[in-house]
Image (cartoon, rainbow, N blue to C red):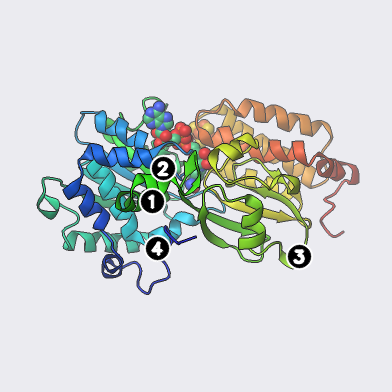
Amino acid sequence: MEKLLLRNVDKENSHTIDVYLSGGGYRAFKKALKEMTPDDVVEEVKISGLRGRGGAGFPTGMKWEFAAADVKEPKFFVCNADEGEPCTFKDRVIIEKDPHALIEGMLIGAYATGCRYGYIYIRGEYPIGRKILERAIAEAYERGFLGENILGTDFSFDLYVHSGAGAYICGEETALIESLEGKRGEPRIKPPFPVNAGYLWKPTVVNNVETLANVPLIIERGGKWYSQIGSPDCPGPKLFPVSGKVKRPGVYELPMGTPLEEIIFEHAGGIVKDRKLKAVFPGGASSSVLTSEEINVPMDFPSLAKAGTMLGSGAIMVLDETDCIVKATLRLTEFFRHESCGKCTPCREGTDWLVRILRRIEEGKGSEDDLDVILSISETMENSFCGLGMAAHNPAASTVRKFKDEYLLHVKLGRCPFRSV
Ligand code: NAI
Ligand code: SF4
């Protein structure tokens, strides 16, 4: 497949505006600004079928339509670059190697929705990305793509970078907005959705980095062209970060809907030392596990939902036959316990109890009843206040269901069977 999202990343100095312009950069923005109305741009994105790449897969054109229809001013356009899901490192490639594609996507989005100011909220652990973005924004101002009356039109847009301080919850869009306002990053109740009441309670579009990098392609080549790539009801190119026990870990750009099995065994080279594949978390650390018998599934939002898990950020985490499923689940759950903001009881208490129980099973001190307790806690956590708590129990609940024998072996042996005695 022709490289689309990663078309620039192997070029020398791909992060500079000169290299971006020499490859046709900012042509789509100029086309939108000079030849299309804001409504035309929204319509083109709707035709493309683009769905958000942050994890939830909400239709981008619809989000922009809602924001465009809101008359409150000023409006804000925010890029969520708080990529914090364990094993998710796809946005980083765009931020560091092709920052102007992101800026161009934001400019087009801001024009389409009538936003005057923009923020890129980048995770604190991406200091290099922050510097690269700041330099790219300065270059865009110098060339007249940002600021007042851009390219002689009445469209004005100012863009700033804001660095997070290391809290995973700030990737949740309403916590991100709270943090941007200078407050503690805790989620707000939804609705109202940010498109109507976001930053400073004004209409705010929040889009993920990868989502925005798709936008110049759609405007330049057309929504219809884009809609024919990948899965019909979930089209476009997709970045898949693959990690764990594969021979060639990395970020792969493939059409949405590429089978998981093909990504692992063809693109990522198969399992290290040709061992057996044991399990895969197909959509980041908060997705439910798939067994080796379940990996012939198209990697898109509807197919993975049908398979009882989710595409999420598209981050594929592979475990082989030498990995302990209990230990892997414990590690993931420890992450969520650490990152739970503590605002609501099911998540604050649920993640803590899951960690305690998983740890005692992993240490060989658990009982068979513990498995039912894990499932019962998971059920309660479904009622958490935000997506973090609603999904944090997925690794525990799904591995207990699908790898029950391995959990029971820990109980029976009184130790981890994968640990040398
Ligand atoms: P969500 O379904 O609540 O919202 C998705 C987007 O659509 C949001 O921007 C929301 O404002 C918008 N939206 C939904 N319904 C709307 C409506 N009726 N009107 C206007 N706008 C509407 O999902 P959420 O909680 O924002 O995201 C959850 C996903 O985030 C999970 O699937 C998870 O995979 C992913 N995630 C990604 C991480 C990463 O590092 N990329 C980290 C953690 C989670
Ligand atoms: Fe905070 Fe977790 Fe509740 Fe979300 S689910 S509000 S992260 S405690």
- Contact, mark 1 vs mark 2 (Cβ under 8 Å): yes
Q: Position of residue 38 (x, y in %)?
A: 22, 39
Which mark sits nearer the N-terminus, 1 or 2?
2
Mark 3 falls on what kind of element? helix
Q: Which residue is mark 2?
A: 50
Which residue lies at the image location 26% right of the left edge and 69% below the top edge? 18
Q: Which residue is mark 1?
A: 214
Q: Name the outermost residue toward the bottom.
A: 12
Quarter of the figure that contains the C terminus: bottom right
Give the alpha-carbon distance from disc 1 to disc 2, as whole Å. 8 Å
Which residue lies at the image location 69% right of the left edge and 48% below the top edge? 295
Residue 12, placed above or below residue 213:
below
Give the alpha-carbon distance from disc 2 to disc 3, as whole Å. 37 Å
Mark 2 falls on what kind of element? loop
Q: Is residue 113 visible?
A: no
Give the alpha-carbon distance from disc 2 to disc 4, as whole Å. 23 Å
Q: Which residue is mark 4?
A: 96
Three-letter amino acid code at the position of disc 1: Asn
Between 303 and 347, which is closer to the camera in this rendering? 303
For label 3, being within 8 Å of ligand 1 is answered: no
Query: Local crowd at mark 2 within 10 Å, few (<14), some, or many (≥20)?
Result: many
Residue 74, placed above or below residue 297:
above
Q: Is residue 211 left or right of residue 358?
A: left
Query: Local crowd at mark 3 within 10 Å, few (<14), some, or many (≥20)?
Result: few
Mark 1, mark 3: which one is toward the viewer? 1
Q: Which residue is mark 3?
A: 274
Mark 4 falls on what kind of element? helix
